[in-house]
Structure formats: structure tokens, C-alpha cells
Amino acid sequence: MSEVFASQVSLKWQKYKLLEDLGVLPQGYMAKTFHRFSPNSSDMLSHVEEALRLDAIGNERNLYVIKAVPQELRRQLPNFRVEQTSDLAGFDSWVKALPFASCELWVCSTPVGTQDFSVAGRLALSSDPMRQQVLEQVWRCSPRLIDSIATSSFAYSHVRACRADWRFAYQLSEVYVPEGSLQGKASLIQEFEQSVQLMFGQKRKWEALANILFATGVTSISLEYKIIGQELHLFDWDTEDDQRVLARLGKLYISAI
């Protein structure tokens, strides 16, 4: 980890480690994806500034997300988004306005250039066999923004699809293309189908993870994923009681941090 003492490891990091220890993600994936810093470290801003400088040299576009991580669990971490150096001017004010003391700051990135195939999504599952699985996917943005799809200002392409359970194909229920987008609905649907094919290759791992989580007594699960190019990674999970899940599974599955 970058500048973070092992004694300060957050419960959120333990959630992420569970994905590696259950074999859903390769060992070491999280450490390479999330750069972790102590909250008082100046190295974090230097890391983002250097990444932006290299993007400019390589004519690339990436979205950098700085996450404030408390020791206890929170369903959603406060995010500070950076696409250009000038965005960092508001960072200090954002930190001062946080509703809790951070034990870590994490930095991750997502390609957002139009030449990149970059999507993220969320699969919602229920223990109730009468409720459908719901898959929502957005293009070139964070899956966190799925929560704001209903707003009139939503500016990203989005697809929603449903199915009865793991055995069935998805049925499209919504395809949204924002005004001014260079990509049409037919292309969006084609890329969604491509995403589903990648997910099918990991179906057994995802279904096994869901069964393990449901076995702890929770009734709803959401699985979040990213696809960059042709690489699909499930990188987060949420339930109505993550702390109970960790308490029941941690001793069995979570390796040394």
C-alpha cells in the first residue's frame, strides 16, 4: 500500500480483499487498481498530478477518482473526481467538508476517451425467487452515477436489462442515449451484448460469490464491475448488512492484508 500503515486497514478494504480470496479477482488486483495513501500525505496529490501530466503527453483521457475511506463501513464512499489539473483546486475544501475522519485516501482511474471501450455496471440480486435480476450499465463513467440516472441532467449512455435468474438471457427494458452523443442505440446495444458475453465467461464465479453472500442471511446483493477494452473485473459488492457478512466470512476467507 502507499503510505498506509497495516493497523489502519479499513473494513472497506477487507470487503475488496474478499473478492481476491474467493477467487473472483486475481491476487494483487486491488493493490494495483487502488493506490492508497494516508490522509495527511502530500504524495497523493503528486500521484494524481503526475498521472495527468502523462495523460497529456500520451494524448489520453482518464477520470481519476479520489475516495475518502473511514475505518468503519459506509455503503458509498465520498468521491472527488478529477479530469484535469485545475479540478484539484477544490480538493482541500472537499476534504474539510467530509462528514468523518478518513483513515485512508484511495485513487483509481477510468479511461473516458471516446476511443476507449470503457463501461461500468451493477447487477442487483435478490434472495426472493420472484424478483428479477436487474443489470444496469453506463458508458465512460463510474457505476456510482447509476444512482442519478433518473435526473434530467444525466449525461451518459445507459442500458437496463432484466432476467429471471442466472439461467436466462437478459431482456432489455431501457436504452438511453444522451442528446449529442456520437453513438446510436444500435451501437450501444451491440456493446451491451458484448459486455454480457464477457460476463458469461465469469458466470460461475459471480454466482458462487452471490451464493456465499446469501448464505450469511442477507436478502439483497449488488455486484459492481468495470470493463476496459476486453477485460472485465467485478470490483465491489454491497448488501444490506456488509458488516455482518464480513464478521461471518472474514475468518474463513480474508487473508492477511
Image (cartoon, grey):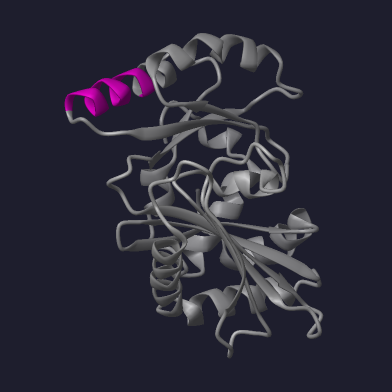
Report the quarter where the N terminus lies.
top left
Q: Which residues are magenta?
A: 48-57
Residue located at (38% from left, 47% from top): 182
Q: Position of residue 60 (x, y in %)?
A: 25, 34
Q: Nearer the viewer, residue 214 or 84?
A: 84
Above or below for 129 versus 108: below
Residue 108 falls in image quadrant: top left
Q: Nearer the viewer, residue 250 or 139?
A: 139
Above or below for 148 versus 160: above
Residue 233 falls in image quadrant: bottom left
Residue located at (68% from left, 71% from top): 213
Is residue 138 toward the left or the right of residue 96 in the image?
A: left
Residue located at (39% from left, 15% from top): 85
Q: Position of residue 246 (x, y in %)?
A: 69, 58
Q: Nearer the viewer, residue 156 or 28?
A: 156
Magenta stretch encompasses residue 51: yes
